[in-house]
Image (cartoon, grey):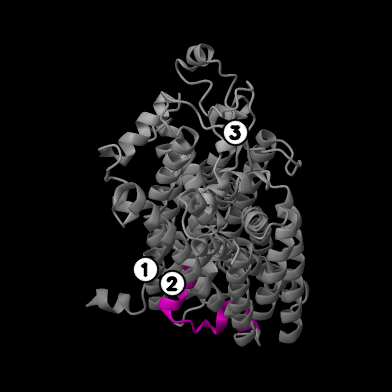
Amino acid sequence: MDQFTLNLLVVGASFALYIGIAIWARAGSTSEFYAAGQGVNPVINGMATAADWMSAASFISMAGLIAFVGYSNSTFLMGWTGGYVLMAMLLAPYLRKFGKYTVPEFVGDRYYSTSARVVAVICLLVISVTYVIGQMTGAGVAFSRFLEVTSTQGLLIASTVVFIYAVLGGMKGITYTQVAQYIVLIVAYTIPAVFISLQLTGNPIPGLGLFSTMPSTGEPLLVTLNGLLTDLGFSEYTTGNNPWLMALFTLSLMIGTAGLPHVIIRFFTVPKVADARWSAGWALVFIALLYLTAPAVGAMARLNITTTMWPNGVEGEAVGVDELPDWFQTWSVTGLLKVEDKNGDGRIQYYNEAGPGMAELAAERGWAGNELVTFNRDILVLANPEIAQLPGWVIALIAAGGLAAALSTAAGLLLAISSAISHDLVKSVFNPNITEKGELLVARISMAFAITLATWLGINPPGFAAQVVALAFGLAAATLFPTLMMGIFSKRMNAPGATLGMVAGLVVTCAYLFTYLGVFFIPGTNMLANNADNWLFGIPPTHFGPIGALINFGVAYAVSSVTAPPPKEIQDLVESVRIPRGAGAALAK
């Protein structure tokens, strides 16, 4: 059986499974559409949360960015994992105890304000739309290679599948679909990693293989990789860059994670507050299976790519144009990978032109510049099985896994968008008397519009999947996270303070992104690439979240300090959400 047919069978079978689950678990009420009837088992919810959380950015893009930058991009791992712990400890149980369906609903009720609810909806829509672009980008990359279609055609196929199971099933269908998607994506991610770790180090556990000795060199894998890269003018793989920017980016991802509405609403689906805590614990276990593997995938892939380009070592000759492996040829067709023989010597020199001593070496050897002119970071994980010459079924499995990761998170985001429009705008603001059937219809229509918009935006994304997602995290950090934290832990925070704080965080962060990124969605451009000369105080747009959060906190506290405190019943509500039932009686004894 040829590879294309195998890919089609595996991916088609996974899509049939998702749609079948959606039909089986079709939502018949608003409670089932928004929160799966609040009857999901904590272990099941933990697995669904992990799938919702591990998007195309985690599965497809993160290891690629780590591979080509090294230690500095470990911030993705630290920020996203740390942020999930922050969410599980400081937000999820309290929001579940509050007992609502959506984040804007909590904001509106806690701050006794329709204006606050509407602003929260606007923030949610900006965050979720930005985030979903990365998912559609990842889906397009996966489709363009494995189903041999253009990325635009791939986006249309992915959108159709998401439309069927998300619109039909709502949160109930999405939950059980995400369980299946988690199983597909974690198997797809770990099997190639195990094979590659065995090939390079003889150790079947990728995380341990990363620090193991390579029989071919007699040195630890990271030492071998560092040596190869420095010989080619690149920085050492294990050396970080600016520690201040690394810390700022990690913080942006952490607090942005804790403010992501599509993940928070997953904790509204369990029966009890204790179940929300257990869900968080189980989700962290399921997430760790991929996140402990990702650094090894990145390092081993970078080593394989480098040795592919220099099969006889840097002292020998680069790979010949006619000697490029099959995987190189197949990925070149997508336009995401490209070489150019600039000096016409029949070989492809891959090196860092700006590296120390490389100009002299290039002049000595007759090189005319780096001839690996395009290597889209998002293809690395998907190409990994082919790079390592693994069996065809593994290649098909990684295709299904990449699509599962993109579609699972896209569905969660689209549900958050749909719920905000139907429940928090139509039901709560414009038409409070709408019937449950009418609200469910509005939810499904708004989701269809959201899918259409996400598809259109995904055609011309402003950067790699993980980079675009990082922008969404910065927006969440600057808007919803401070508002939720103050709503739970400050009885003095009032409606004017929270509303103006969100507005300030959103406006300042968006202004910075658009000022220093330029205009989004220009075809063929990467708006996140090397505009450092224009950055304010050297802060990249993806790192701006904590600055926006500080502005939000500052404005909120300043305004609330000069305006009337919340009503007594709201202060009592805050205390009841934060303090376990019966705690006061226990302390009195």
Q: Which label is found at residue 129? A: none
Please, is residue 393 above or below residue 589 in the view? above
In this rendering, the label closer to the viewer, 3 or 1 = 3
Q: Quadrant of the N terminus?
A: bottom right
Q: Which residue is mark 2?
A: 46
Q: Are marks 2 and 1 in contact (CB under 8 Å)?
A: yes
Q: Which residue is mark 3?
A: 321
Cα–Cα span, label 3 and label 1: 50 Å
The residue that appears at 44% across and 66% down in the rendered structure is: 187
Q: Is residue 352 left or right of residue 459?
A: left
- Label 3 element class: helix
Cα–Cα span, label 2 and label 1: 7 Å
For the residue carrying disc 3, how many other residues have a C-alpha within 10 Å: few (<14), some (14-19), or many (20+)? some
Q: Does the magenta run of residues contain 62?
A: no
- Label 1 element class: helix
Q: Are marks 3 and 1 in contact (CB under 8 Å)?
A: no
Magenta residues? 30-49
Please, is residue 464 above or below residue 584 in the view? above
Q: Nearer the viewer, residue 57 or 320?
A: 320
Q: Which label is found at residue 281? A: 1
Q: Quadrant of the C terminus?
A: bottom left
Residue 86 percent location from the top left of the image = 41, 57
For the residue carrying disc 2, how many other residues have a C-alpha within 10 Å: few (<14), some (14-19), or many (20+)? many
The residue that appears at 49% across and 84% down in the rendered structure is: 39
Q: Is residue 300 left or right of residue 172?
A: left
Q: Is residue 104 visible?
A: no
Magenta-colored segment: predominant secondary structure:
helix
